[in-house]
Amino acid sequence: MAADLHSTIQRILGKTNVLVEKYQALAEELDRVEAEVRTLRGENASLTKENQMLRQENDYLKLARSIVPSQESLEESKAIINQLVRDVDKCISQLTCK
């Protein structure tokens, strides 16, 4: 009977040791995963901030592009100004001849 009790206690101790080892392994894994989560959260915050800055820069570039005239409208404006200058020169020449 003492032998049975002794073997039962040994089995319980063995199972307890296995459970303690598993608990320690899981606790270490939990610490590792929590550290990884903290790292990923920091990286996520950094990328979110970078994304926001890039979106803002994109909006600024869109605005700048809408303000800058196209090449076609620039050429039209130059042609109109050249015609006006020629007209003014004609008027000046007519005024000086008279």
Image (tube, rainbow, N blue to C red):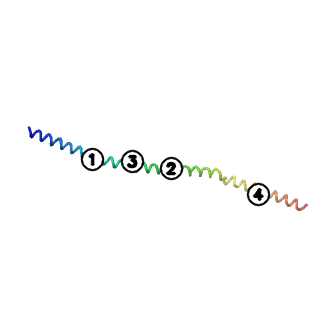
Residue assigned mark 3: 37
Question: In whole angstroms, how far apart are the C-alphas of marks 2 and 3?
Answer: 20 Å
Question: In whole angstroms, how far apart are the C-alphas of marks 4 and 1?
Answer: 86 Å
Image depth: mark 2 or mark 4 in front: 2
Which badge, 1 or 3, comes first in the chain's sequence?
Answer: 1
Residue 55: image x %, image y %? 54, 49
Most extreme residue toward the right is 98
Residue assigned mark 2: 51
Residue 82: image x %, image y %? 76, 57
Residue 89: image x %, image y %? 82, 60
Q: Is residue 1 above or below residue 49?
A: above
Question: In whole angstroms, how far apart are the C-alphas of marks 2 and 4?
Answer: 46 Å
Image depth: mark 4 or mark 1 in front: 1
Question: In whole angstroms, how far apart are the C-alphas of marks 1 and 2?
Answer: 40 Å
Question: In whole angstroms, how far apart are the C-alphas of marks 1 and 3?
Answer: 20 Å
Q: Which mark is residue 24?
A: 1
Residue visible at 15% across and 41% down?
9
Residue visible at 60% across and 50% down?
62
Residue visible at 85% across and 58% down?
91
Which badge, 2 or 3, comes first in the chain's sequence?
Answer: 3
Label 3 sits on a secondary structure element that is: helix
